[in-house]
Amino acid sequence: MRKRRAYRAAAVKNVLIERVLESAPDGPVCVGLDVGKKEIFAVVRWADGTFERPWKAKNPSEIRVTVRLLRELADRGVLTVALESTGTYGDAMRQAMTDAELNVHRVSGKAAHDYAEIFDGVPSKHDGKDAAVVAELAAIGKSWPWEFKSKEDNDAEMARRVDWLDAQQSIKMLWLGRMEALLARFWPEATTLLGLTSITLLKTLACYGGPKKLSEDPAAAERLAGWGGPMLKPEKIEALLESARETVGVRQCDQDIQRTQQYATAALEAQREIQNTTRRLKELAKNNATIQRQAEVVGTVTSCVLWVALGDPYDYHCGEAYRKGMGLNLMERSSGKHKGELSITKRGPGIARRWLYFAAMRMAQVPEVRPWYEAKKAKDGDRGKGALIAIMRKLATALYNVGARDEEFEAWRLFPGRSVASKNLRAQNEAAACAM
């Protein structure tokens, strides 16, 4: 590539491949792609380290034209086409290249970012240069095979259900957050008696919209008992009715009542979708031995989320690689305020970290883990986030061993050597079980 205006792009439809090949050196060829929402930039790197100027194609209308040119390059000799692993804009291009039997590779987005200044001495990034950097990394062996594979029906449905479940969970939390503000204004006593996520409370609000209509209904106690079932004690029902009669909350107008009913109804609908989707995920996971093993540790839903977001743990060479795929590997963070602090990279699917965080919250209550969690929380000034992230990191490697190596999960092994009391508790529990 000549230095002057080196990244000036030519429209792919104007590229004459015969002319490109006239003076091409012998040897393997690498092509780097930078795929955006509307445009694709391709840069050819020859075996002697020289580059062609970028080709620019419209995405998706000129994908076939681009693939045809790449196929002609491949017919000449060994060709590797590489692109970054970020986003979904490149999926159509990757499928087309795989269908054309091209050798498709993946380059880490972080590697491409870090290599930008090494490449030409300038840290700037733009589409043409990004494609050239990807080609260079592929040429020096910093890429991995990445052919497009269509999901099997079972995995495709699981991916759809996981996406829907995660969306409904977010929707439910949105409405609960708004309801919490309304209840603090109109019926602050309610959440001291029933949790905000209580189905009984949600059904009460969807039906009555607030304390006034609830207190006026002579059949309210019977309805509450029907919604709450045997777990809702008569004393709790009477306390809820009493709070509705004697509330110090702001008096509601008709629009306030309708708003509360709408929010509660929407939250209930999201909860129903969550329950239905959870049941279906459990059915889909029945024949997947890996998911079933991991489900014993973190539950079926979280195991399905990890399967969809990360794939089969067998495809990772070690637990640290599996954890890195979640974005839970550590990096040093240094700036004016932060000196040498470690934080997770978050370079991975956020949905995997989000659901694993919920699993870590549950794991923190397990007797073998809780002492360590409480000690770490106290050390951090009564802030538990750092301790939960530590549990997430340990869980990630444990789930790899459970899923890929078929090892038995034991909670005390998450922090070996740090909680002798937990090991002793486990031994005592086993001894008590044998004595029964």
Image (cartoon, rainbow, N blue to C red):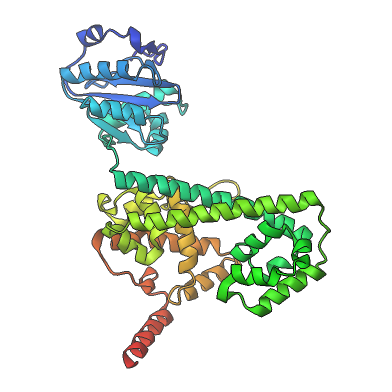
- In the displayed structure, 14 sits above or below 191; it is above
Residue 280 vertical position relative to residue 70 in the rendered view, above or below = below
Q: Position of residue 74 (x, y in %)?
A: 19, 21
Residue 261 lies, in percent from the top left, at 69, 53
Q: Residue at x 38, y 11 (%)?
A: 11
- Asked whether residue 220 is in view, the answer is yes
Does residue 48 appear left or right of residue 122 in this picture? left
Q: Nearer the viewer, residue 299 or 310?
A: 299
Query: In the image, 379: left or right of 152?
Result: right
> For the image shown, how many numbered marks are present on the structure?
0
- In the depicted structure, whether residue 13 falls above or below residue 191: above
From the viewer's perspective, is 220 left or right of 308? right
> In the depicted view, which residue is nearer to us: 192 or 230?
230
Residue visible at 59% across and 63% down? 199
Q: Residue 374: x and y, percent?
A: 53, 73
Q: Furthest-bottom residue in view?
A: 435
Quadrant placement of the C terminus? bottom left
